[in-house]
Image (tube, rainbow, N blue to C red):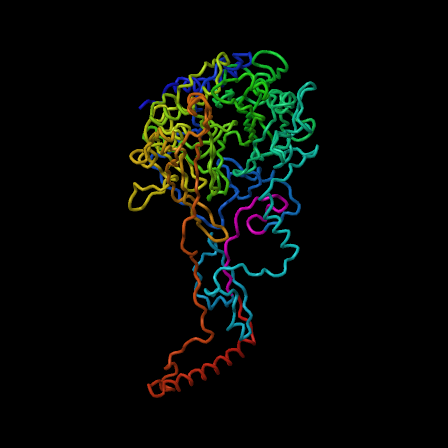
Amino acid sequence: MTNTASLRTKAGRRASLLAGVLVCALLATGADAQAATRPTTESAGLNDPSTYGIDWDDVPTEPTKTVVKVTAENCLCDLTEGTCDANCCCDPDCDSNEKAQFTECATCVYDGANAAMNGKVCLPEGRSPPSLEYCLPSSTVSRVNLLSSSSLGVVTQQKADMSFLSQQLCIKDDNSASLGKYFLDPGFATDDILKSSVTLQSERFWNPVPAAASETQPKYRHNDTIGIVTAASGATLPGNKFVLPGATFSGVCGWTNVIGYNMPLPASAASEDATCLVPIDDTLGKSCTTLLNAKYLVNDLKLAKTPGSSATPTEAPTISSMKYRSRIGGKLTDLTGTGTVPDTTFTAGSGSGTKDTCNFAVVEAHYVITHDGSGSISSFAVDLVFADVMTSNRWSAVYTNPLADPGNPSSVRVKYTVSWKLSAETVVPRSGAPGYVVGAPLLAGTKDTSSGKNAVARLKDGLTIPGAGPDGRCSGNSKSTVRFGMSQSSSCAIPLSQNNLKTFCQGSGDKAVADYLYDLISVASVLGGTTPDKTKAPGSSVPLPAQLMDGLLYGTLDSNYDLSAKTVMVAAWANANYENIADWKSCDATDTTDCATELTAAEQLTKPSGDSAMSWDETTKTCKNVAVGVNIDVLTAKVGHLDHAQSKVQRVKVSWNLADWTYTDLIPRTDESPWDDAADSRQDFLLKSTVHFVEMAQDAPEGVKPASPPILPTLPADVFYPFLSAGPAGGRAAASAAWCVALVAAIFVAWVTARGDESY
């Protein structure tokens, strides 16, 4: 059995980390005034796992689980840890200065705790607490078992009608258990109800167009457009505002993402508005000078610190990191500290290897803008990813190889994000508060240990499964994010000749799948490429899906895959703190080894064996029991009030998807065996991973619904003893007499109470 280590090394990773450490010194001193250059060679491989940094000083030695209370007072719009979420009135990170910058909304009217925010936008915070109203005189109520300040309910007292019948039949609400839980007809809707409802729904499903700040306005308000300040010869963005490319209706990029003050991009955890497609044929030359150009997006970009045409500009963005993405496979090479931001140029019509190519196109830009909390921008930084983008014709001319169709891409996907922070803040997005938002990434990470402390190295993309690259083939650097509540499947292709399939199935392959896929297209003399060996096949000592996931969810340790055999943690709640590992555990009270959302190496996947092991059938040219993907089952549950239910993860389980691969791509000939092209003709074999979200079968919602009381109370038969006998012979007569006396007394009381009001 051959190890797939052949071309996987760790030296490159250590070098990239060292370059990252040196970036600040190089940028600060101007040690290298030359522009960064592309790597002279490319190689296959997986990018480093991207995780949020752990501050071990903040990690408790003995973590304690945070008690999550799901009440009507949870702040649903608080979706970013450590910073004020725009227009989230209940966010504890928002001080009075920041709330003063919230978006103006003349028609927004609130009651209760948010009444002070009238005239501003407040994002949805959850339903109001359920209320209990009672209509008896205070002297007749002994106690109510709900605190008036409880987060579970509000108790109010209504003055009761003092007439006799109203006192006997004072029914505020019908809580008959036989009715169940229904929405009743709310009756006539007033204009005020409409205004209130519009206010509550504001920005729930869409993001309002940023509003232009006035010339005399001294500070930005939330969602005000941000001006840019450019030199006379500098590049200008549309409208002289901070605008980034975004998807139009067709998915093609246009200048659609107008950035508002303190408004993130994407607008929500479940949104996909940060990516779009740039066509790379007839319009690549134009896109190279605009949408993909570093002059517009970095070099000449200076933001106006405050509104107005005479505003002071910030400096151009600080470059936090620069990476170059390889043409094949998407491998990132760290260029941080190697020079200044290179110019984006277009080479057209001639030249070897660069004809019809947009050189150093900006394919990813991730901005972090720092503000002072009072409506002014202080500075901003950016993380950049560059790539050389070729037209389809140029791509096919350069990457001509008999082993596989090079794919001829017709577009390139680009991505832009914006986040905001105060100077001392660390911004970490959440997937809900506290329950998950449908469509938000499923939070996941691996257990990390330092100096006896445990924390979670939270993956920035959440839990992922193998995905397809631009050409539809599998790529370890093109994973698909698992999104909460959305069952999904992700597929990609592995091209194999008949000989490749047999070699792979019999365990004789000696290449990591990432190396194998790279060599299918690699060409000698192009960026260090060599002529590939068509007899090579991917190794099977580690199943293909585990290789593509860098060992995530694979329980057998392999030094070539960073995440193999690491304990995988999935957050039960969407706002779990990754520096407090107790918040990520959900263990059985009696069996503490059973932690439903913690997958140790023993609970993860291993290479199929026994009856499930791969085997080759020479007669049918079939490889049986190929592990073609992972299957993830996620059990979810609802917690809280019916009007405010929060979704959480209860348990996670993983298994293999197995399938048979049969080589059927035959080329019939008259003079030769149909198997004669076994070494050259390649067939696409499908990898398919699946995710299933399953709702837990829960008991009926709990609630207190006592039986309706009788109108007339039951009196003991001897209530008027010794005036009336309650003996066996006269029991019925005595009871009747008792009711007669009680009725007379009631009439007398009604006459007395009708003459005067009891005070409240």
Disc tally is: 0
Q: Residue at x 42, y 83 (%)?
A: 738
> Relative to 676, is 107 above or below?
below
Residue 294 in the figure: left or right of residue 629: right
Report which quarter residue 626 is drawn in. Answer: top left
The residues colored magenta run 111-134
Residue 138 visible in image: yes
Foreground of the two, 469 or 88: 469
Residue 86 in the figure: left or right of residue 549: right
Q: Residue at x 50, y 18 (%)?
A: 401
Q: Which part of the image, by quadrant, shows the N terminus?
A: top left
Report which quarter residue 634 is drawn in. Answer: top left
Foreground of the two, 44 or 334: 44
Query: Horizontal and vertical percent for residue 688?
Result: 44, 34
| Residue that sits furthest to the bottom in the current view | 729
Query: Horizontal and vertical percent for residue 123?
Result: 57, 44
Q: Please say whether residue 416 is one of the residues in the magenta stretch.
A: no
Foreground of the two, 757 or 541: 541
Residue 323 visible in image: no
Q: Please say whether residue 116 is one of the residues in the magenta stretch.
A: yes
Query: Horizontal and vertical percent for residue 298?
Result: 59, 22
| Residue that sits furthest to the front in the current view | 670
Query: Horizontal and vertical percent for residue 354?
Result: 58, 14
